[in-house]
Image (cartoon, coloured by chain):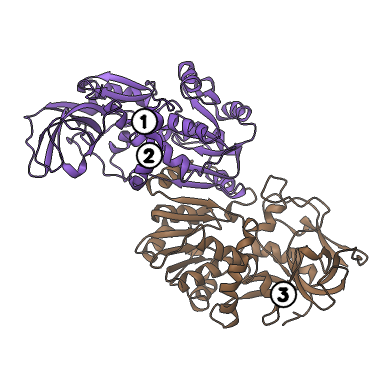
Chain colours: A brown, B purple
Amino acid sequence: MHRIVLARRPQGAPTPESFRLETLPLPQPGEGEVLVRVTSLSLDPYMRGRMDDAKSYAPKVELGEVMTGGGVGTVVESRAEGFAPGDVVFGMTGWADHAVLRGKELRKLREGLPASTALGVLGMPGFTGWYGLTIPGAAKAGETVVVAAATGPVGSMVGQIAKAKGLRAVGIAGGREKCAMGRDVFGFDAMIDHKAHTDARSLREELAAACPDGVDIYFENVGGMVLEAVLPLMNTHGRIPLCGTIAWYGGADTSGPDRLPKLWRQILVNRLSITGFIIFDHWQHFPDFMAEVAPMVEEGRLAYVEDVAEGLEAMPQTFISMLKGGNLGKQIVRLAPDPFG
Amino acid sequence: MHRIVLARRPQGAPTPESFRLETLPLPQPGEGEVLVRVTSLSLDPYMRGRMDDAKSYAPKVELGEVMTGGGVGTVVESRAEGFAPGDVVFGMTGWADHAVLRGKELRKLREGLPASTALGVLGMPGFTGWYGLTIPGAAKAGETVVVAAATGPVGSMVGQIAKAKGLRAVGIAGGREKCAMGRDVFGFDAMIDHKAHTDARSLREELAAACPDGVDIYFENVGGMVLEAVLPLMNTHGRIPLCGTIAWYGGADTSGPDRLPKLWRQILVNRLSITGFIIFDHWQHFPDFMAEVAPMVEEGRLAYVEDVAEGLEAMPQTFISMLKGGNLGKQIVRLAPDPFG
């Protein structure tokens, strides 16, 4: 089997030297365990946080340890009740082409859609967008939601569920191609290209024009300039579900004026609610998500876009590129044909 | 009649020149209105915000206009249904010894406790503490709450309701006398003197020792160094009801490192909920508050302390001093003997 381990902790953006490809003998499942052949792996921004030697919401990856991550694949050998060879499953396989996991750590996938959807639109990222918009976001028809990384698997879910619920959805993304995709594929009412702006004030002007009734929900997954642009546009009793601050990952420059007093005052004056959430705390809502969204995907009422790279050895470079916005849609890496393909 | 108007907008702390005392003919109530002789006026930190020419949650006071504020007093003349001379009432009288208000803007007070309690423990400040701790704070037995300005009418309510609900209550106040009052009169488990600390790190060390199980609720009414000290001590799923940022009122120096990225990350990593609230939005909960707290006050199970100044002309200097922490307990200004004694 092959796997990719953390070789060196990055300062700022990861580099190819942050990772190392290893070859090991094929592992054998113990009692209650299952050997899975991975067909597709997920790449997600949260993985960057796990590479740091810092307190976070999940254990960091140790040096020499396999990089953490979700994957889908087929069962090769099972010593766990309820799993048989050929079953298609999702689990936290890590960056590897084979994984041994306990049966209770695996979720069996039903046929109908490509298995890779369990990594994106019908997996953790889609669920994150749905949960954040619905529960802490408390989305109501007639309101306006703003989301960055709008063509990614989280943002595109936010936009589409918002439209389905009767909200105005305004997306932010980098570059013309993504903005066109946001409008044409995901149905955002307006898309704003952050690459056309070099400061928050200029971005804010375009945002204000796109949000004539102000902003009721800012789905926060980036931080940085976008946060600064959106905050003054928030309406009274606005909500900010906060699930990521990627613009500030990895030691971004944070000198300059202290914006905390201003933020604190804005939370107060506008009676905002800011709710940090980590989707891993909320799996009890996953069945509700699937019940609502899976039929929408199956019937073609909810779009998803995958950006597919090929081969385990492509993981590091694809991850590095994704963190810079180089992907178009949900980034996955295919190791073998999709079993439901 | 006498009243105090806003003479000049302050830069930073107000000065005596910010105010002007005026003498006017006694006003006459129109149809539906009531003339009230004020016996006690309230002084509260929120009044500082109303003096600025800035967007806030309530209209600013215009230059030459009477300073905003609540008062209690007795009805002198009534042309409103349900009010008769001698009734004791609460209303937004402004800084004045007489006021004409519409009947529906007044609340009749029941006998039993001094009328001035309607300005503090059983008024807006007490209600603020009770609401913030109970609703956005979602206080649960066994948790730890930290509150600054702990001997003020908001903080002392937070501490006592917390104790009644089985929480550990840790208060912060300025000086030995207030700390002794916090422990002895209001029953805080621990009191910390912020004047003994010159930086957030040192304050945090004493706080950490006083909160061996971390902090579940930080009732935020000050901002500044206290916020910076508390934030890293917050437990996962902690709550920060935010009703004031007095440390940052009036143009405090905010240069130095930008703390926003760190705050944003902490909200996320610890899944905090921060809820800005303005108590004026939540009057529908006031009957619940009174039903729960008024009997506690009447039966002596909930303490309150008033710091009483005398005479309308004392309002400016007492306000200026209060903003610097010069008061001990709820600050009121008495214009005439309390009608309920």
Placement of B327 over or under B52, stated as above or below: above
Q: Name the residue under label 1.
A: B121
Subunit bearing disc 3: A
Q: Name the residue under label 2.
A: B291
In front of the other: A203 or A152: A152
Image coordinates of residue A280 in percent, x first then y, are: 65, 57
SS for dot 3:
loop
Could you classify mark 1 by the number of other residues whose Cα lies within 10 Å: few (under 14), some (14-19), or many (20 or more)?
A: many
Subunit bearing disc 2: B
Placement of B59 over or under B185, stated as above or below: below
- Image side of residue A30 versus residue B230, left or right: right
Foreground tag (2 vs 3): 2
Q: Does label 3 lie on the same chain as label 2?
A: no
What's the CA distance linking mark 2 and mark 3? 54 Å
Picture quadrant of residue A29? bottom right
Subunit bearing disc 1: B
Can you name the residue that lies furthest to the top here? B177
Image coordinates of residue A13 in percent, x first then y, are: 67, 55
Q: What residue type is labelled 2?
A: Ala
Q: Mark 3 points at which residue?
A: A109
In front of the other: A171 or A159: A159
What's the CA distance linking mark 3 and mark 1? 58 Å
